[in-house]
Amino acid sequence: MSASILTAINLKKKYGHKIVFENLNFTICENELVLIKGPNGSGKTTLLNILAKYDNVWEGVLNFKNIDLKKLKLHKYPISYIPDEPIFFEGLTVKEHLIYTASMFGYKRDEIRELVETYVNLFNLKDYLNYIPSQLSKGNRQKVMICCSLLKKFDILIADEPFSFLDADSAKTLVEIFSILKENGKTIILSSHETEYFKNLIDRILELKRGA
């Protein structure tokens, strides 16, 4: 059995007096693909933001390999996040985003060039390398965000609706990448309405209900 990588005990999140969820308990293991399900407003994005350390205001216990997530420095937390809304640096081109992202993770120059070229070809972004992301369609912006996330070194990939606005070929490519990541022992945690694409890869489902 795979070792646990994330454990939540009595996890609670609220905004003011509004409880998003409470008494949330789960364990996620290495090499799993876990789907976060629930109706709108049940806290799927909120939970993913917490797991990605985008949100550190919550109650309960949340451990990464028995280390308190609140005490763990972000640079020591090997995760990559595909948020529901792509986030980019102002003024940088697509190519500059990809090169800059890869350069933060200790790759050599030749490795960066090879990695960037690989993902650019996989997601058909060659014609958009000199564009600013804001000039692109929603689908191409999503593909750039996915590429940036995959260029990082991580043990856990967290993704919030990663298939949104993707064409069928790009969605198929992303599923193939998910499969390879699992084969390499990576953990994937995601929410998505397009489960048909990757249903055969799902190991477990964590279902949220409003306020619970």
Image: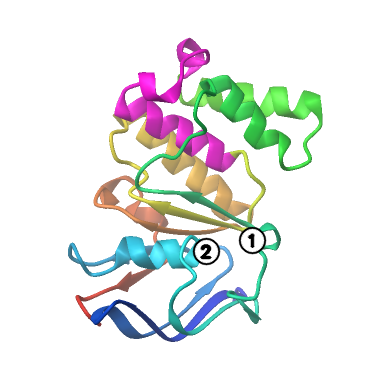
Give percent across and percent down for residue 25: 41, 85
Q: Which residues are magenta?
A: 125-150
Residues packed near mark 1 inside 10 Å, few (<14), some (14 to 19) or many (20 plus)? few
Q: Is residue 52 above or below residue 16?
A: above
Quarter of the image where the C terminus is located:
bottom left
Residue 129 in magenta stretch: yes
Looking at the image, which residue is at 38% across and 25% down?
140
Judged from the image, the secondary structure of the residue bearing numbered disc 1 is: helix
Q: Which residue is mark 1?
A: 74
The residue at 29%/79% (across/down) is 21
Mark 2 or 1 closer to N-term? 2
Q: Quadrant of the N terminus?
A: bottom right
Q: Main secondary structure of the magenta part?
A: helix
Tell me the amino acid under the disc marked 1. Leu
Q: Is 123 colored magenta in this rendering?
A: no
Disc number at residue 50?
A: none
- Front residue of 104/126: it is 104
Residue 43 sits in which quadrant? bottom left
In this view, the residue farthest toward the right is 108
Position of 47 with respect to 61 (left or right) is: left
Q: Which residue is mark 2?
A: 53
- From the viewer's side, name the closer residue of 126 and 76: 76
Image x and y of residue 19, in percent: 26, 80
Q: Is residue 94 above or below residue 182?
A: above
